[in-house]
Image: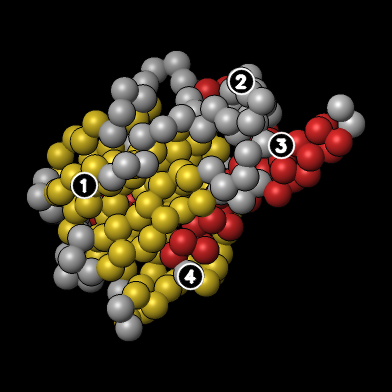
Amino acid sequence: MKKLLLLTFLFSTTIGFTQNLVPYKVSEDVSINIPKDFQVKKKPHNTITIAIIDDNNDVMVSKGNKKTANVPVENVEDLLTFYDNLQTGFLRGLKGKLINREIIEMDKKMFLKLNCAAVVRGKKQYFDSYLLLLNDYTYAIMFVHKLPNDTNLIIPKAKILASLKFKPGLTIHNQFNKEESNFAFKLGKLVGAFLVYGAFVAGLVYLIIRNRKRKRNAFYNNN
């Protein structure tokens, strides 16, 4: 696991970014600053907030509307397995190609950071995504850009990430749960959909939990 050391770098690089950012309350647990002209789209499985940074770059914040209580995450190993399956579903829904993947730490929380590319409506798009499981809900912060190495995105991206705040007292233990049900190993848990305003529809994100299914089948076969 790599720790993302943001504070010193981020505060030093945000000086030149003048676009107005406003606080946005994602949930009772999470808030972040985003460009003030944003739109909120409520879907059956998640709520998506989309804002335009400039002509080439957008930012999207997503929160699942349903808990993932049917997916037991009791320790770091389970969380990493959850993220592995989330990555599989994310790439499948996006029909994208993975460029880079990291497990990073921000404010004592473990994030899955994905960099990938996809062709949407005939045009190649790049996605820098920060995915988080917290208190049984799945969150995503996604930066979407048209250019592979757009230097204009560096400063606004750093400033937005630096503004990410959590409810006081939340730690990595809030990324675990102790709940299991008779359907704890159910395959195909839907966790979210991603959509960028006016440019593309990224599709649905599915969890593929094959190892959970095998354990469930073994349980039924032995009883």
Residue 167: x and y in percent read: 37, 21
Could you tell me the amino acid type at mark 3? Glu
Could you tell me the amino acid type at mark 4? Gly
Q: Please name the residue that numbered disc 3 is placed on.
A: 77
Residue 60: x and y in percent read: 29, 52
- Residue nearest the observer in this picture, 165 or 192: 192
Label 4, secondary structure: give it: loop
Identify the coloring.
secondary structure
Answer whether labels 1 and 2 touch (C-beta < 8 Å). no
- Residue nearest the observer in this picture, 158 or 183: 183
Above/below status of 54 relative to 184: below
Q: Please name the residue that numbered disc 2 is placed on.
A: 179
37 to the left or right of 98 = left
213 to the left or right of 7 = right
**10 Å neighbourhood of mark 4: few (<14), some, or many (≥20)?**
many
Q: Please name the residue that numbered disc 1 is placed on.
A: 41
**10 Å neighbourhood of mark 1: few (<14), some, or many (≥20)?**
few
Cα distance in 3D space between marks 3 and 2: 16 Å
Upstream in the sequence, badge 1 or badge 2?
1
Upstream in the sequence, badge 3 or badge 2?
3
At horizontal 28% and vertical 68% (from top left) the residue drawn is 200
Answer whether labels 3 and 2 touch (C-beta < 8 Å). no
Answer whether labels 4 and 3 touch (C-beta < 8 Å). no
Label 1, secondary structure: give it: strand
Upstream in the sequence, badge 3 or badge 1?
1
Quadrant assignment for the C terminus? top right
